[in-house]
Structures are given as structure tokens and as C-alpha cells.
Image (cartoon, rainbow, N blue to C red):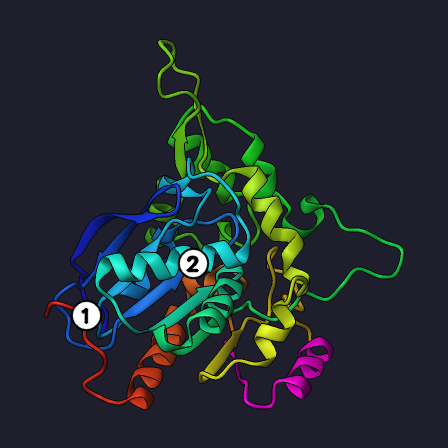
Amino acid sequence: MTTAATEAPLRLPVAGGELVGTLWRADATGMPVVAVHGITANHRSFSSLAARVDGPLLAVDLRGRGGSRALPGPYGLEQHAEDVAAAMTAAGIERAIVVGHSMGAYVAVRLADAHPERVASLVLVDGGLPLRPAPAGEERSPEEVLGPAIDRLRMTFPSGDAYRDFWREHPAFGPYWSAAIEEYVDYDLVPVDAHAEVDAGLRPSANPDAVVANLVELDGRGGYVEALESLAVPTVLLRSPRGLFDEAPGLYDDEWLATWRSRLPELEVRDIPGTNHYTILLGAGVDAVADAVAEAARAAGAPAQQREGR
């Protein structure tokens, strides 16, 4: 059952500054959940999930995104993992189920590899497996991979309504528009120049340099494949049948998934029908994500790890 989730805004110290985030359900007694958002996203993508879990849920804007936009690089996956670990410590969370959506799933894998004692279980939401490489001799631009999701980072908008209209035209968002999507979209805007005397408009919060720095890592380079193959925590991958443009197949087609299942025999894979890469979290798939979290918490044992200071 969905219930309203209490929430508290947080600013958590990390190298070079602070991460902005939210702790939902701080007084809940279930196992804590730490949630990591996607490559151009923000932590408000987990608002709906927070209302469906039994424990506290912590999510932060990653370095170079949302309220953490001003944090300097490096922006690599390993840095994000260290930032999440630092945020957990600052929030008093010793150990948690870690949910990663899209690029956040890669961050979750890096976190589990570097700090296995902090991760009880991984729930990878349509992400975490290396992306299928481009055909030999070809390169894909960020625009080809992410489409409107990265195009918008170089755009300005006169109002929040104009930004909503932009997203309503997106094939993976518009047909599935909801209050959760609208809240997520509204949070994403920041002033072009907060100190200007004349209103210069609004822009999406993600730093394009941070996005590109992470995009090139999603093929498994830099030791990521080795980290993935050596995971020692229970891991489930929730796969959407439709992709970033609501197209089929989704991010991981059957052939590519079979390749990785042969390399990761302990990986549990669940298909979440009726979803695309975004609505698996921001729409119809959120109950399936919550179910995976609940199962992970039961497997980890109850009562689960409590936050420090309780």
C-alpha cells in the first residue's frame, strides 16, 4: 500500500563540498534503502518509491546534478560511489539495500565493490550491465545515446510550464505523464544566472561535462567489468522491455542479456512488463521495484540493520 512519506532535506559533506538530498521515513524501522539516480536525473526520481518501502530511504543528487551541481569533478563512477558512502556515513546509515536506476546502477555496483560491508543487497533498475558497444568502426555521440535527455542540458526555458511542455513531447514521458513525473521535472530546473538583475531564464540542473564523463564509462571500462563479476552481495536486475525512447527492445536485448547472464550466473533477472527505461521507476514499474526491495530486506533478515543513534 502506498502511504505519504515524511521527508527531511539534507546537505551531506563529501569531498569538495556537500551533496543535497532527502531522507524519507526517517523513523521507519525497516532496513534502510539508499537510492542512486540516473545519468541526467536527480534524487526526486525516488519520491514514489520512498512511499512504498518499509525502511528509511536516502537519496542524493549526485555530483554535478540537481542541488549538487556546483560540486567539482572528478565525476567518475568511483567518485560517485565514494560520495554515496560518505553520504551514508553522514546520515548515520551503516548498511543498506542499494537501489540504482540507469547509471545509478553502475554507481551501486562500484559502491558494493569498494564497500561490501555497507551493502546488504543490490537492486539494479534497468542498468548496471555494460552497454552493447557500437559496431566496429562506429562511434555513438551522447545525443545518439541519450537523445532529448542530453539535448535539453544545453537549452534554456522561460518557465517551468515550458519545461513541462518539453518533457510532455518526449515519447517515454508524455504518454505516461503523472504527478510523480511532474514533481521530478519541476525539481530539475535552476536559474541560468541566480545573480543576474534581469531574469535570464531557467535551465536543467545537470552539468553536461559530468554527464559526458559518465556516459563514456558505461561500456565497462576502467575495471568496471571486473567489479561487476566479483560482486559478493545478492543482486537482482529489473529489466524494462522498452528503452529511452519507449522503443523495443530496451536497453538490454535478449541476446546481450544472455551474454551477461552466462558471465554472472548468480544474477537474478526480472522483466517488468508495461514499462520503459523511465517508467520502470517513475511510473508503472515502481511497485515492482518496491517488491524487490521488500524481498531483499526479508532475505537480509528482520529486524534489519538500523540507523546509528536509534
Q: Position of residue 171 (x, y in %)?
A: 57, 51
Give how far apart the Cα atoms at labels 1 and 2 are.
Answer: 19 Å
- Give the label on residue 274, or none: none
The image's mark for residue 82 is 2
**Which residue does the numbered mark 1 point to in the structure image?**
307
- Asked if the magenta segment contains residue 84, the reply would be no
Against 279, residue 294 (above or below) is below
Which secondary structure, mark 2? helix
Mark 1: secondary structure: loop
- Compared with 198, 243 (above or below) is below
Q: Quadrant of residue 224?
A: bottom right
Position above or below: 103 against 152: below
Q: Position of residue 199 (x, y in %)?
A: 39, 15
Determine the residue positioned at 54% across, 85% down.
267
In the rendered structure, which amino acid carries the disc numbered 2? Glu
Magenta segment boundaries in residue numbering: 254-272
- Specify which label sits upstream in the sequence, 1 or 2: 2
Count residues near mark 1 (Cα–Cα under 10 Å), then give few for <14, some for 14-19, many for 20+.
many
